[in-house]
Amino acid sequence: MTGWQAYLGLDDDALLAQCEVDRFRASGPGGQHRNKTDSAVRLRHRPTGLESVAVESRSQHDNRTSALRRLRVTIAAALRESIEIERYAPPPGLAGVIRGGRISVAQRNPRYPAVVAEVFDLVEACGWRLSDAAMLLSVSTTALGRFLEADPVLFRAANGRREALGMTPLRGRA
């Protein structure tokens, strides 16, 4: 398995070509049309073993698009690239979304998975000490925590990694 850069730079067709695609029937929206077509989509990324599922729409095409977007975020949260802390400066893609001491990028923005991956690389290099990573990003520790908390996939991944390192989990806002 290699780092996230090998996969997140691919266009949707190239990334999809690396996946096994399962279509199935799932409960969800549709009323009387529910369970009449195999519109749910599960993607299994063969090189990494990561997977994503989308069942929200009655459209298989829409679910495939959603599953691909989720797969990109899953790849970003799971795969790491090494960075040198001593000479660290946020790469242009990440620096471009740091505004007013916060990381400001919408989850539907195509740059979002790369931003997530770059943040996770830095936090991993800092031993999952958010305060150290926040200082290098010129954001507050709270702002970094809120960025991770805003996406349930990221929050679970961050807490899973912290738990594996014997650290206390991040607390979400009540």
Image (cartoon, rainbow, N blue to C red):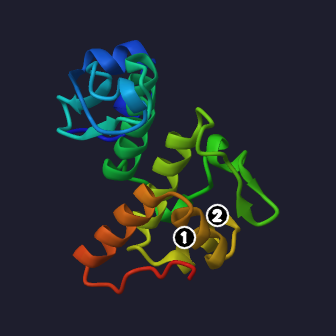
Q: Indicate the position of residue 82 as horizontal and vertical percent values.
A: 37, 52
Q: Nearer the viewer, residue 147 or 26?
A: 26
| Separation of marks 1 and 2 at Cα, in angstroms | 6 Å
* Residue type, mark 1 in image: Ala
In the foreground, 102 or 87: 102
Residue at 44 percent of width and 65 percent of height: 155
Among the 4 quarters of the image, the one containing residue 32: top left
Residue at the front extreme, as displayed: 32
Q: Which residue is mark 1?
A: 133
Which label sits on residue 169?
none
Is residue 19 visible to the viewer in this orientation of the structure?
Answer: yes
| Res 25 quadrant in image | top left
Depicted 103 relative to depicted 95: above or below: below
For the point 32% across and 84% down, which residue is it? 167
Position of residue 78 relative to residue 172, above or below, is above
Q: Position of residue 20 (x, y in %)?
A: 19, 22
In the displayed structure, 70 sits above or below 22; it is: below
Residue 145 pos. (x, y %): 56, 72
**Residue at figure coordinates x 43%, y 43% from the top left:** 73
